[in-house]
Amino acid sequence: MRDHPGPAVQSASQTRASIRILPDALVDQIAAGEVVERPASVAKELVENALDAGARRVRIEIRGGGCELVAVTDDGIGMTPDEARLALQRHATSKLASAEDLGRISSYGFRGEALPAIASVSRLRLLTRARGAAEGFEVRLEGGALIDARPAGGPEGTRVEVADLFARVPARRKFLKSPQTEWAHVADWAARMALARPGVHFELLRDDRPALVWPATSDVLARLAAVLSEADAAAMVASRRVEGGAEAHVLVSRPDRHRSTAEGLHLFVNGRPVRDRLLRHAVLEPYRDLLPRGRFPAAVVFVLVAPEAVDVNVHPAKWEVRFSDPRTVHHIVSSTVKQALGQRAWLGGEATRPAAGWRTIAASPHAAEGAPPDWVLAAPSPPARAAQSDPGAAFADAVLAAGQGAAATQPGLRFAELRLVGQLQCTYLLAESAQALLLVDQHAAHERVLYERLRAAWLRGGMPQQALLLPVTLDLSPAACAALLGAEEATRGLGFEIEPFGETTVLVRAVPALLGSADPAEAVAGLAEELLAVARDGVTAAPGLRSLPAADRLLATIACHAARRKGEALDPREQRALLAALDEIPFAPCCPHGRPVAVPISLAEIERRFGRR
């Protein structure tokens, strides 16, 4: 009797089977398992064929979520009768001629497996007419077997109907979801393709009723607004960069607009929608200290590289790609996103908008030759002024000094040029521009300014330090104490002088000068917790803290504890100094922990609320 639920162990002689060639029908079904996952996979393959055939109009019809019918009609070049017959045979394609062609693929499809694989698990009808031909040709198959092939009437182009998907493969059909879910997958993929090809007219019908129509356009923002939403389009900023044989065009959401998932990321390589970890990381990395944890931007990212610099043949469904120089691609995408985020025009008015088409997106001024490669404040600070007894003047000097050395010119709005209205609830500064009322969170703004100054000093390896008149004693948890004391080199580099004073107690003898009158114990406790989190995330404290992601977290913690708080009254000089300091850092849409620095309320919105519009 078997004492476990697994299969019984058999001898080699009982399990040995002879090697054989699989029947063509079974081979086609195996190929179908790689290519056809669900109705959306069918729509994807058929639309890609249509676009490769030069289609300018594509119509997608879905019934029963695609289980009953997926039909794609195009106005492409069509096929001759002989080509139509060949297209339904395995490994037949017009897109490859030699082994060398595999290294420079520029079409969507090329394997020559899609149509026969789809036909093997459905009823398929292909109706096509080549351009200039007097008549068309029709082919019908069921379960991969030819039923009929004959001349037929029809417009120039091709129509492929796929009915009863997986009807003869119940084991596959039972894994399909509800018609609503399957339709959602089709619509999502179609939306991605519509973003990739704004010059093509797309039309989707669901259960014989019009569902989605995206007219052809030369303006990528117009297509984005049609496919996603007007709100998403209005919240986008654009940038373009060319470097190292690669080209990136990005449309990314402003830091004040974010969502709970990364589903808003739309990535394209040479016009092909992809799901690529490298590109995803390159887009998200610039938002690292701009968005709260667990929040994500929306983005439409186009990457152009030479066909031979990317391998699109690494996934059966062609969702993944492999770059010959991934470092360059990551850098150019990340840098282009940073350029886009560096624009602050949205704070004072409408977002930057390209004139026409994604190829015409204007580059940010930072893309010019000689511009800094990163938005990090890296220039040396000037000598500090003599201390003044007036706390308001001292604070003004401190925040102004935080930005000295950065580029003086910034695109878009300049905070210092706004008319200062005053302070609201000792928390928000109110400033007026020609188009809007700007609310500036004083804590978030000051935190961002201090963070940039701390980061610059840390990168230079010279954090100014202030000795305490009396050491501060601080009790910590054993784990936090161990993390803090284990990172002595890192904490000293950040401007702290800390020594053990018992098993779970430390003495703080010096702190970064920028902390000023902030509570040293609170700052060190926060630093210890952040060091503990860094260690828990698998990043070594020293010397590994020289890695920017780990160090940035510590710098953000220090800046947060040193910044002026909510509820603190600032006199007019302090208010103006803080606004001026925001102009002197490369950009400041959010504090390092992701809260917005400034929120505009447009004049149009104010007038609408008062019934003037």
Image (cartoon, rainbow, N blue to C red):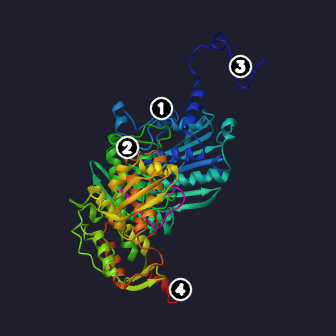
Name which residue type carries label 3: Ala
Name which residue type carries label 2: Ser
Name which residue type carries label 4: Arg
The alpha-carbon separation of the residues under discs 1 and 2 comes to 18 Å
Residue at label 2? 106
Closer to the chain start, of discs 3 and 4, is 3
Residue 170 found in image quarter: top right
The alpha-carbon separation of the residues under discs 1 and 4 comes to 64 Å
Residue at label 1? 91
Residue at label 4? 609
Tell me the quarter of the image containing the N terminus: top right
Q: Residue, x 45% and y 57% (percent of image)?
A: 195
Q: What stretch is highlighted in magenta?
A: 249-264
Q: Marks 2 and 4: CB-CB under 8 Å?
A: no
Q: Does dot 1 land on a helix, a strand or a loop?
A: loop
Tell us which disc is closer to us: 1 or 4: 4
Chief SS of the magenta region: loop
Q: Marks 1 and 4: CB-CB under 8 Å?
A: no
Residue 241 found in image quarter: bottom left
Q: Where is residue 51 in the image (x, y as percent from the top left)?
A: 45, 49
Closer to the chain start, of discs 2 and 3, is 3
Q: Residue, x 45% and y 69% (percent of image)?
A: 596
Residue at label 3? 8
Q: Marks 1 and 3: CB-CB under 8 Å?
A: no
Tell us which disc is closer to us: 1 or 3: 3
Q: Is residue 33 visible?
A: yes
Q: Does dot 3 land on a helix, a strand or a loop?
A: loop
The alpha-carbon separation of the residues under discs 1 and 3 comes to 40 Å
Q: Position of residue 108 (x, y in %)?
A: 43, 44
Q: Is residue 132 visible?
A: no
Category of crowding for the residue at label 4, using alpha-carbon neighbours closer than 10 angstroms: few (below 14), some (14–19), many (at least 20): few
